[in-house]
Amino acid sequence: MDFNFFMSAALLGLGLAMDACAVSMANGLKEPCMKVGKITLIALLFAFFQAAMPLIGWVCVHTVVEKFEAFGKAVPFIALALLGFIGGKMLYEGLNDRCEEGEQNCCKPLTFWALIVQAVATSIDALSVGFTIANYNFTEALVSVGVIALVTFIVCFVAVFLGKKFGTKLGNKATILGGLILIGIGIEIFISGVFF
């Protein structure tokens, strides 16, 4: 493992983290009163799933490739359904929320299960990365996904803070924007997975 190996893993992690980054920002927009502990939890969940999916893909490549290829075709539909549902719920809440800007009791926290669904939905397409690291031995695959997790954690942590900053200024409109972002990401994953 040399510098190029780590640089390649970091760039791969950065590319994979973009959907998680946008969703993290949407979470900050939705919950501008979020505490540092929850921000850390969000970043950890996204990092865990962004690392776990390529590792699962790597295991599949070395064991059940045929079944994984069949499942791969369903990934864009699953991501669209999950992100569309959460985004639609946020959009509905934002349009029907009667809270005034800056009102503290209107900060509706995201549930743990909603965060899990987001983390899975934004990382499920990373299963295919298992094919790109298929030539790695197990140790190299572990180090690679460790770097991916670290990059994702940093990107998502910063993104939630940015979302919080704008969420405080945007008030109720932040939840609507966050919902639109999630729906947009779901559509983008679907289009790129089905048509390209």
Image (cartoon, rainbow, N blue to C red):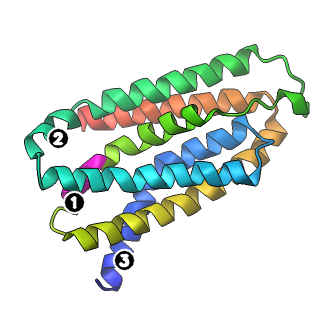
Q: Secondary structure at mark 1?
A: helix
Query: Considering only order in the chain, which callout, 2 or 3, is on the residue closer to the N terminus?
Result: 3
Gap between marks 3 and 2, in whole Å? 27 Å
In the picture, measured across the screen, residue 100 lies left or right of residue 22, that is: right
Q: Quadrant of the C terminus?
A: top left
How many neighbours does mark 3 have within 10 angstroms: few (below 14), some (14-19), or many (20 or more)? some
Name the amino acid, label 2. Phe
- For label 2, the residue is 68
Question: Residue at position x 72%, y 17% from top?
Answer: 95
- For label 3, the residue is 6
Query: Considering only order in the chain, which callout, 3 or 1, is on the residue closer to the N terminus?
Result: 3
Instruction: Identify the magenta region.
Output: 127-133
Question: Residue at position x 75%, y 46% from top?
Answer: 164
The image position of residue 91, as x and y in percent, is 63, 21
Q: Quadrant of the N terminus?
A: bottom left
In the image, 78 versus 179, the foreground residue is 78
Q: Quadrant of residue 191?
A: top left
Asked if 124 appears above or below 138 in the picture, the reply is above
Query: Considering only order in the chain, which callout, 2 or 1, is on the residue closer to the N terminus?
Result: 2
Name the amino acid, label 3. Phe
Gap between marks 1 and 2, in whole Å? 14 Å
